[in-house]
Amino acid sequence: MIETSKKNDFRFFILGLLLLMPVVFEFANVITSDASSNFTLVTYVIILVYAIIKNRYFQLTDLILLLAIYAMFAFNYLLFEDSRTYLKSTEMIIIYVFYIPICVFIIRHIDDWTGFTRKLFPMAAIAIALGGIIVFFCDYSILSYMEFSYALLPFLAVHYIYWRSKEKFQLASLVLLILGVIEIFAFGARGPILFLIVLMALYEILRVDLASDKKILLFIGTGILVAVIAVFIQIIIEWLETLPIFKNSYFLWNIQQGNLLQHSTRNIITANCLDRISKMGMEISGLFGDRQYCGSIYPHNIVFEILMTYGWFFGVVVLAGLVVLMIKSLSISKNRVAASFVITTLFLRFFISGSYIIEGKFWIFLFALFSLIHVPRDIDGENE
């Protein structure tokens, strides 16, 4: 039992590293003004070698699953010529060599999500600390406001759940949560803020240690707070804009422009995708086949991307499979909080930004779900 626990802790350590790496890379970019690709490559290699050596034990089913995934990419390469350039890109090579093997051999085998925030707390603290250094002490104009904000999102969720739990160092998590929210506001991405709010709401709804009447009071209080903020939003924005840290906040700029929930470029992309879907019949474009209908960029919506990639029949099957996996993970009572964490922080973004196939977080999400639905059901209770 002790050995099993150690293996599970190691798997969570690797999970934490995978989530932390984007933050570390962005930190290196700011500190050095332009971190070399060699640093990124060496980091990937070190983590991969460490994970393989430390894990040691591999199952035959893991190897079969890995080969099946590679076969899918290989068939796509052979059948769809337009996909070949994308399939040979640096981003995809990192997915093949790094993310998929680690997710198959390690993340898929996390067998107990109990206390997952406690296990991820050290990485979450490091992430917020690095973000604080960037925001308060560095020129972060070279960073992608969106990617860095999404990189911080899982760690903000960890701190929120940890703070609301009965673990030690709750105050530390509250402080780090507030600092992390300030960091995201400074960068200005809207999506991570939305998904953090969704995570908070789901957590409060799903938690079993809080009576229903207290939940109702909590949501009423939250509603009143939101209403007050809405009434005084202009005053609040004007005050925030006087603070140097928020002078370049894309979030505040969009509020001022009345574009908080709008994005003209994505509206055009959506129109192109809908036009393609309405005319494609039973045609299958293959991986990355959607790009030619979106001005050589991705659709910014995983539903559109999957339908345009796999066609109506296989696309619907893939989407239905994802929905079933998510519902099944949420149906296991002791894993509902963990499933909510995985879905909201690693997956929901693909409905408004990002391309799932080239994102390490998507593969982490997918295999984390596999681990969640295969955890024994003999223990019932909240899995925070």
Image (tube, rainbow, N blue to C red):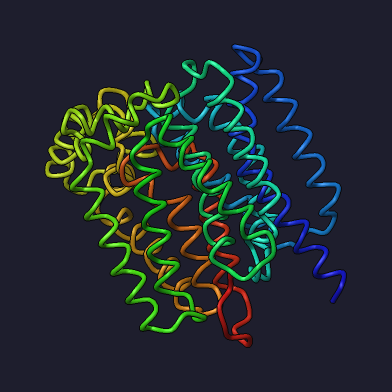
**Residue at figure coordinates x 57%, y 59% from the top left:** 368
Q: Is residue 263 above or below residue 194?
A: above
**Residue at figure coordinates x 34%, y 48% from the top left:** 194
Q: Is residue 297 above or below residue 76?
A: above
Q: Position of residue 124 (x, y in %)?
A: 63, 47
Q: Nearer the viewer, residue 64 or 362?
A: 362
Q: Classify residue 311 as left or right of residue 14.
A: left
Q: Classify residue 326 as left or right of residue 56.
A: left
Image quadrant where residue 63 sits = bottom right
Image quadrant where one finds the N terminus: bottom right
Image quadrant where one finds the C terminus: bottom right
Q: Nearer the viewer, residue 123 or 221?
A: 221
Q: Position of residue 233 (x, y in %)?
A: 23, 41
**Residue at figure coordinates x 33%, y 39% from the top left:** 190
Q: Position of residue 265 (x, y in %)?
A: 21, 27
Q: Is residue 112 above or below residue 235?
A: below
Image quadrant where residue 45 sits = top right
Q: Position of residue 243 (x, y in %)?
A: 40, 25
Q: Nearer the viewer, residue 119 or 167?
A: 167
Image quadrant where residue 36 sits = top right
Q: Is residue 63 visible to the viewer in this orientation of the structure?
A: no
Q: Classify residue 329 as left or right of residue 4.
A: left
Q: Is residue 127 visible to the viewer in this orientation of the structure?
A: yes
Q: Classify residue 11 as left or right of residue 86.
A: right
